[in-house]
Amino acid sequence: MKIFKQLFIILGINLAGELVSRYLNLPLPGSITGMIILLVLLLTGVLKERHIRDTADFMLQNMGFFFIPAGVSIIVSYHALDGFYFETVLVVVLSTILVLAVTALATQLFINLSEKKNGKHNN
Amino acid sequence: MASITTNTHLFGILLTVGCFYLITLAKHRSRLNWLNPLLLSVIIIICILILGDIPYDHYMKGGSVIHAFLGPVTVVLALPLYRQRKLLVQHKYAIIGGIISGVASAIISVVVLSRLLGLNDLLERSLIPHSVTTPIGISVSNMLHATEGITIISIIITGILGASIAPMMLKLLRITHPVAKGLSIGTSSHALGTTKAIEMGETEAAMSSLAIGVAALTTVLVVILMQMLGWY
């Protein structure tokens, strides 16, 4: 029963997100509006973690399963890759390395800056 | 005869559940941690469809039922964010600064590199969310009118690559702060990279799982902004 109750809550929030996105004409996809709604409900204490925990954790731990059909859809879209297999992988590889480096360096910089600032206040 | 079995909702669901179950089982039994059940399932199902001469539409009858759960899977991504809320507040400046830099570099590098290497427009759009967690990456792909299949494959490549090079890269760049380590792993290589952050330590793991959600939401906002400005 618990699983049904939790699934009902999660699906209900998903539907609420879809409705809010549509009727407020938000550029956000409904599922992401739903994610924000859930976050707000949790932060305000309207919803407790235990109301969704088991079902949510099952979905989070086995997320890959739900993407399989979308992944299989490459069978009808791989033509876009014709002649550019290597270049496509290269873009992904270089971009990933860059994102990792930029995020790490920027974060370290921001941490150092804020620590310096705090240090000054203390003195 | 064959189409009687395959042209049903049951076929696609059974094939997907069966593949995922068997591969996950093999992964645990063999302790091959690099095995990616999603990627392997996709490859095996495509092989079965081709070898069995089974139409894609037949598979998708059941596949679309599973695909419909992407909505709720996206919604529950709020839970890891909620669980890390204290860290989020504690390190807000580093998180905002680091993740905005990361998201911007992801989008800019895809656009610039795609154009340099002559990739077509559809590919370029499909690769933009390559660092984003899959359910939201698919949403971004749809927002950009790109193709889900290519986006997913690029997300998986990113995750596997991030997980394997992150420890070496961070050492090379002399990144020592656990917040910077975790944040950069989660931002660049989502949940697959986070498996490496978990091995590094508690703060790294928490920051990485926090970065997955924040970076994904930031990417969505940046893409919306780009569309409002008339790019894409």
Image: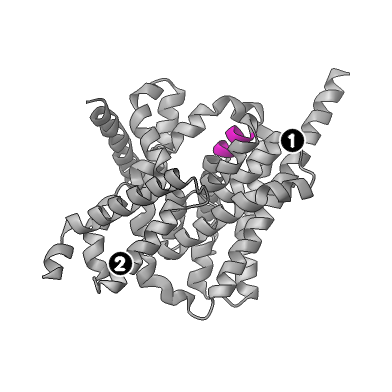
Is the residue B181 above or below the residue B117 in the image? above
Q: Position of residue B25 (x, y in %)?
A: 38, 46
User: Is residue B209 part of the magenta span, yes or no?
Assistant: yes
Are dots 1 and 2 in contact, CB under 8 Å? no
Which subunit holds the residue at mark 1?
A: B
**In the rendered view, does B132 fall on the left or right side of A24?**
right
- The residue lying toward the viewer, choosing from A13 and B3, is B3
Q: Residue at the front extreme?
A: B30
Disc 2 on helix, strand or loop? helix
Name the residue located 42 percent from the left edge and 39 percent from the top edge: A61
Name the residue located 25 percent from the left edge and 52 percent from the top edge: B65
The reply to the same-chain question for discs 1 and 2 is yes
Specify start and end residues of the magenta stretch as a single range: B204-210
Residue B89, quarter of the rendered image: top right
User: Is residue B116 part of the magenta span, yes or no?
Assistant: no
Q: Which residue is mark 1?
A: B177
Which subunit holds the residue at mark 2?
A: B
Name the residue located 67 percent from the left edge and 57 percent from the top edge: A97
Q: Amino acid at mark 1?
A: His
**In the rendered view, does A68 fall on the left or right side of B203?**
left
Judging from the image, the colouring scheme is one colour
Q: CA distance from mark 1 to mark 2?
A: 47 Å
Q: Main secondary structure of the magenta part?
A: helix
Is the residue A47 above or below the residue B116 in the image? above
Q: Residue at the right extreme?
A: A123
Disc marking residue B48: 2
Q: Position of residue B37 (x, y in %)?
A: 42, 52
Is the residue A117 above or below the residue B8 in the image? above
Disc 1 on helix, strand or loop? loop
Q: Is residue B78 visible?
A: yes
